[in-house]
Amino acid sequence: MSGATERPLRADAARNRAKLLDVATEVFTTRGVGVPTEEIARAAGVGVGTLFRHFPTKEALLEAVMVRRLEAIATRTAQLAAELEPADAFFACFRLVIEQSAGKNEFAQALAAAGVDAHAALQQSSATIQTHLAALLDGAQRAGAVRPELGLPELIALLVGTSTTMEHLGADPAARQRIFDVVFDGLRPR
Amino acid sequence: MSGATERPLRADAARNRAKLLDVATEVFTTRGVGVPTEEIARAAGVGVGTLFRHFPTKEALLEAVMVRRLEAIATRTAQLAAELEPADAFFACFRLVIEQSAGKNEFAQALAAAGVDAHAALQQSSATIQTHLAALLDGAQRAGAVRPELGLPELIALLVGTSTTMEHLGADPAARQRIFDVVFDGLRPR
Amino acid sequence: MSGATERPLRADAARNRAKLLDVATEVFTTRGVGVPTEEIARAAGVGVGTLFRHFPTKEALLEAVMVRRLEAIATRTAQLAAELEPADAFFACFRLVIEQSAGKNEFAQALAAAGVDAHAALQQSSATIQTHLAALLDGAQRAGAVRPELGLPELIALLVGTSTTMEHLGADPAARQRIFDVVFDGLRPR
Amino acid sequence: MSGATERPLRADAARNRAKLLDVATEVFTTRGVGVPTEEIARAAGVGVGTLFRHFPTKEALLEAVMVRRLEAIATRTAQLAAELEPADAFFACFRLVIEQSAGKNEFAQALAAAGVDAHAALQQSSATIQTHLAALLDGAQRAGAVRPELGLPELIALLVGTSTTMEHLGADPAARQRIFDVVFDGLRPR
DNA sequence: CATGAATGAGTATTCATTCAT
DNA sequence: GATGAATGAATACTCATTCAT
């Protein structure tokens, strides 16, 4: 459906692009967006010039990283929505977004920020996810599994916030589960 | 060598220091920590030299700002603990921390970060608050108002996360209240 | 008449600013505008930061250099106009501009370029000179010493062009005089 | 080792080379020599690699462009010299050089610069033209149409300078003619 | 003590040129 | 031969911090 605007990249170029995205994802996630471009390029095993050939701006690189994340989430979200009952799908997706958003918070907040001030590609991805989320929320509310007064903005804010909560909590699975218990119970009516 | 660690500042010096803290609080909160020191100094009506005389490092300034915030929170927390029933005190303090932490998130996360990697002064303030929070949590759990399995780390992470949630939600009071409903209900047993 | 917008610079700052202007004039004139800012700063005995404190942009530095030149020319032009008969004043000024414009041509062309696309300060200086030139041209034409059909644009273009001619001719005074003979005789009626 | 320095280019290679020269001439003339090589290659419909196969250096491309121009001028100059009386030929050639040199000045100055610091091919072309110019100048001086004291260096400098004059004057034909009147009258004896 | 000028390491980005496809 | 991806040195500008006035 989407126009094939780009010619298929040469094999090595595609490899470099993918490597850059992987490295940038890792680096932005663990150390924030302040990391020098040169370092990202070096970690990807290419020169700075190559980085800037693929992403004309550091911001463009960041955007590409986020778009890829959001698209991955959108895909999984759609799967879950198709496979599960509304209520289960809603909570499964909530979990999914939280787990995928791990890492530096400035980064995880992309989902929300995209709606406001980001560039086209990001807004597109963000909008797609938000559509899915709205549908999931609505389904769960109709099924009586989520407080009816909550809107999409609150849901998104809660996703971002819970992601932050988890980030500060660390990896302990039991503790993370306790947070999910709190949030999920709080989301249910009454 | 002298017993007193700090001599009493001259009146104007004290005024400058206070003004710098006020301005820095405002600036860091609304525009993040990336703002140049010169701009902070100018906004405070002093030269950069003066800023660096009072705070030897930009980081030290940030720390001082946070310490002041934490101390204010600690004070109010103690008050509330003294005035209210345990359960009410707990929830009132939760609200208080969230409202006080408004602003750029990088900043709000100081509370938690302080426990991990921060400098002495910050750790001190943070520890004080954490002691209070631990007491409040314990009181509320004994009163049966909060899930007994939650520990201090989860509480702190939830405070940071909920602060982020609110930041992304904006100012709409009704929506903010809905978030408090979710989190507070979720915190309660069952 | 002009508002004293700037406070008097500190002695050292004024010295640095002047040194930077001198060095930049020399460097731009002999080697063109492509010379790195760092090199200019080093030649002036200051750090790059200092250069950029005084001139927020490389372009601003270039502009300042040109403004200073134009102002010097304007001053001398006014003197000559006051001291000499119209015809003599005109030719003396022509000579003056040519001699002062020595150096890389891109630079000498400022006079004309300023009228078109330059910044405020430059336009101001350029306009001042052009006013003087127009008066001189008019005087010389009334005195019958210059072809009446020539306008200010042609005069300015001739100044720039003759400057280029001289630049390519080098320093030989006899040859330069021969060029002046050609141009001055050509400017006269008939 | 083989006698012929250049083997005959394959048809497409020759086409590419010609296209590159055309495009580069246009681009250098209208936008200066700062234009990136990639852009020139793209405008010529080839890859950068091809550009660098034909011209090992950006400078070499610039040189080739200038050589072609100079050769064109040399050809026309020779024609004019053969067809016209010495005096007329001289002035016609002067005009010709000026009109052909239109465009960014840095470029037009090649003629003169070539004599000084350029590469072999350029010097060759330049020398050819200079020989022609010297002959024309001599003829016109013998015919009493040009001041006898002028030498070839002055003539060349005047060509470059007048080219600059025209460039700054723009396209207005009447104004351009007035400049020619000035210069040509100035060139004549007395 | 206050000031703000000076410093210079650090950073994003460009572009001539090389080389794998 | 042609292509365009890769390279990395080069460059303008920023900003925390120091120090002369």
Image (spheres, coloured by chain):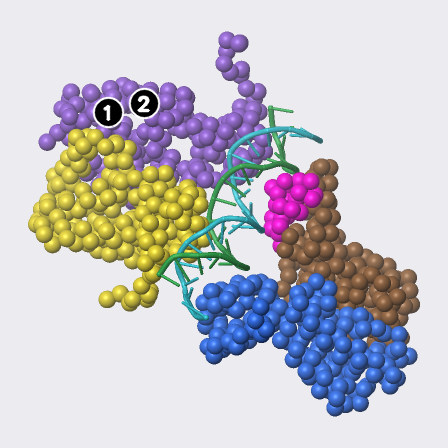
Chain colours: A yellow, B purple, C brown, D blue, E green, F cyan
Name the residue rendered at 23%, 66% in the picture: A1
The image shows residue C29 at horizontal and vertical percentages of 72, 56
Q: Is residue C54 magenta?
A: yes
The segment highlighted magenta reads C36-60
Q: Quadrant of residue C140?
A: bottom right
Q: Which mark is residue C13?
A: none
Identified by mark 2, the residue type is Ile
Q: Which residue is mark 2?
A: B129
Residue A33 visible in this rendered orientation of the protein:
yes
Q: Is residue A49 above or below residue B38?
A: below
**C121 w.r.t. C166: above or below:** above
Quadrant location, the C terminus of chain A: top left
How busy is the neighbourhood of tag 2: few (under 14 within 10 Å), some, or many (20 plus)? many
Residue found at x 55% / y 64% = D56
Q: What amino acid type is highlighted by mark number 1?
A: Leu
Q: Earlier in the sequence, mark 2 or mark 1?
A: 2
Badge 2 marks a residue whose secondary structure is helix
Circle 2 marks a residue in which chain?
B
User: Foreground residue, A185 or C186?
Assistant: C186
Label 1 resides on the chain identified as: B
